Image: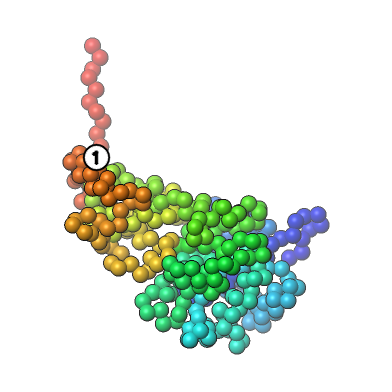
Amino acid sequence: MQNPPGKPRRLNLLWLQSGGCGGCTLSLIGAESPDLVTVLDIAGIDLAWHPSLSEATGFELHELLARLMSGQEPLDILCLEGSVIRGPRGTGRFHMLSGSEWPMKNLIADLAPLARNVVAIGTCAAFGGITAAGDNPSDACGLVYDGREPGGLLGPRFRARSGLPVINVSGCPVHPGWVIETFLQLAGGTLTEADLDGIGRPRFYADHLVHHGCTRNEFYEFKASAHNLSEMGCMMEHLGCMGTQVHADCNIRLWNGEGSCTRGGYPCISCTEPGFEELDHAFTVTPKRAGIPVGLPTDMPKAWFVALASLSKAATPERLRRNAVADHIVVPPVGRQRKPHK
């Protein structure tokens, strides 16, 4: 698209997909107020190509890639959705660019140094994610992480032309608001390395915990716990919820304005964290030692948690005790009885 005279050049965004399910794109197109198209227009970003959203395909894509590789057309933002597929035996031939003899991992490695900014969309692109689970037969990895370990395709020292490392907008799938806000900050030139946490996630969402804003927090405070997924109580003690340890603002920045995993009755499974796919327990089970959950809230010493939990359980109101193991409110809160004025 041509830029009107006197106006800043519009940015070019190229979106590639590799080893993943496409769920991050499905999440992103559900963005509301504003939607993705509106955001890109406001930010001055042109979508050069997206495998699901663009009409161009086949030779048109190959011609675009040639222009980007030659520098004839600028590459301002390179997004990767899905993990990088390195197999078999490092050749990358498990995933080839359609209509070419070009392994996708080579294409990504060639384009990344040309991009002003590189963004990993979702946990697969950031850390390997579900695609890298188990024996990892496809040898999947993230752009600069291989699970919890630095490395991946580009290596931990990689820097885009802007000087920024890969921006890891993790989540499985990613929250559309996280992607949109990242794009807006990149377009405005306001995103700095100080705005990323220690593993490259934007701090505007990674400085929060899923626990923040959870509607079950009253149950958590009194350790009034659910035993089954259909119940209203806190899911940390018995049902594997990791919301007190996981970095994300899911219960503050709701999905589609109204939902989150815990609000939908399912425990947080730590999908924004590296290695979440390789937990040593089932997602809906809380591992314990001597009856104490192994995964305790962030920054809380075990002795304090045990002491506070004991006090909390002793002080649990009957209303919470009963509601915690019900699938609806069976005991509503009541107001204090006020003495009449004489």
Give residue 248's quadrant in the image. bottom left
- Residue that protrudes farthest toward the right in the picture: 5
Measured from the top left, where is residue 154 in percent x and y?
56, 72
Measured from the top left, where is residue 97 in percent x and y?
58, 82
Report the label total: 1
**In the image, is 304 to the left or to the right of 128?**
left
Which residue in the structure is indicated by mark 1?
332
- At a point 22% along the width and 26% down the height, the residue shown is 337
**SS for dot 1:** loop
Measured from the top left, where is residue 186 in percent x and y?
63, 57
Q: Amino acid at mark 1?
A: Pro
- At a point 54% along the width and 55% down the height, the residue shown is 196
**In the image, is 259 to the left or to the right of 240?**
right
Residue 298 visible in the displayed image: yes
Front-most of 260 and 165?
165
- Residue that protrudes farthest toward the top in the picture: 342
Q: Residues within 10 Å of mark 1 (few under 14, many from 20)?
A: few
- At a point 41% along the width and 82% down the height, the residue shown is 137
**In the image, is 205 to the left or to the right of 315?**
right
Front-most of 134 and 44?
134
Front-most of 129 and 44?
129
Query: Quadrant of the image for the C terminus?
Result: top left
Give residue 222's quadrant in the image. top left
Query: Quadrant of the image for the N terminus?
Result: bottom right
